[in-house]
Image: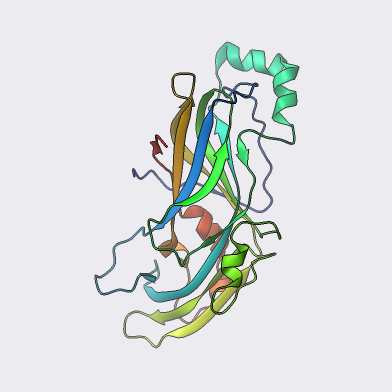
Amino acid sequence: MRLFPKPSVLAGPVALLSLAGCGGGNVDPGMTLDLSLVTSRARPISGDAGPRELVNDRGARAILTGGFVTLSSVELLPCAQVGWKRFLNQLSPVGTAWAHTVSNPTRLGTPHVVNLGNADGTVIRLGAVRPPPGRYCHARLVFEPADDDAEGLSAAAQAQPPVNMVGHSLHLRGTLADGRDGEPQPFEANLQTRAAVDVLLEWVTLSEAQPHAEVRFALTWDTWLDGVAAGQAPTSVDLVANVARSVVPPSVEEP
């Protein structure tokens, strides 16, 4: 997986962009883009560290004993148009009407509660979208509180101790210490805030010649506590924005 510069984060309520663009206006039932994600580390750590042990950017050492985050939606954003194509789309009422329909073929709107208890590299299947033929240069991932229809709620409810993620975007618990020799202090954070991020795609192109592809994102969980010093409450930092910033732009693979 190739790494790109970290994407920018849009905090707060997210306004959906108009999708009129080089994605076109007609849905081809033969076009399929599978979406999935994995968890991974962003930073190296000593070989004797536990599977959910980390050192953040402030030098604090944390061990996470539980974690769930709600990925609310993933939306494909078409590449920007130039010249006469942009002009024609601005004149076309068909493209505009399609962009605001409730059933959006470029947006996966099924919320998923992602369990940090899964081993890094475990593929979490999010679902598939059936976008129109064309090029897509960015994806927008939105993290916000789960509703009662979110996938993965039962895994959180069966955790030890149980976690109710309805109405929550992030749950983290564990210990935090000042370096390796500091006294670990337990913490628990339950957040209801929202954040979104636009990540770069490698020009996902769907066409009759290439009707299927897969995009796999990675969440680098060992950056979620960045900005938190030992002895400081983790909730004093916008942890959900940290989660959004942790998304690694994916490579595109054949499914």
Q: Between 27 and 48, which is closer to the camera in this rendering?
A: 27
Q: How many marks?
A: 0
Task: Give the image quarter of residue 93.
Answer: top right
Residue at 69% of width from left, 51% of height from top?
A: 13
Q: Compared to 85, does 221 lie above or below?
A: below
Residue 158 placement (x, y as % from top left): 58, 73
Residue at 55% of width from left, 74% of height from top?
A: 159
Residue at 69% of width from left, 56% of height from top?
A: 149
Residue 42 placement (x, y as % from top left): 36, 58
Residue 62 placement (x, y as % from top left): 41, 75
Q: Between 175 and 212, which is closer to the camera in this rendering?
A: 212
Q: Compared to 138, does 31 lie above or below?
A: above
In screen coordinates, is 87 left or right of 201? right
The N terminus: image quadrant: top left
Q: Compared to 183, does 253 lie above or below?
A: above
The C terminus: image quadrant: top left
In screen coordinates, is 65 left or right of 152? left
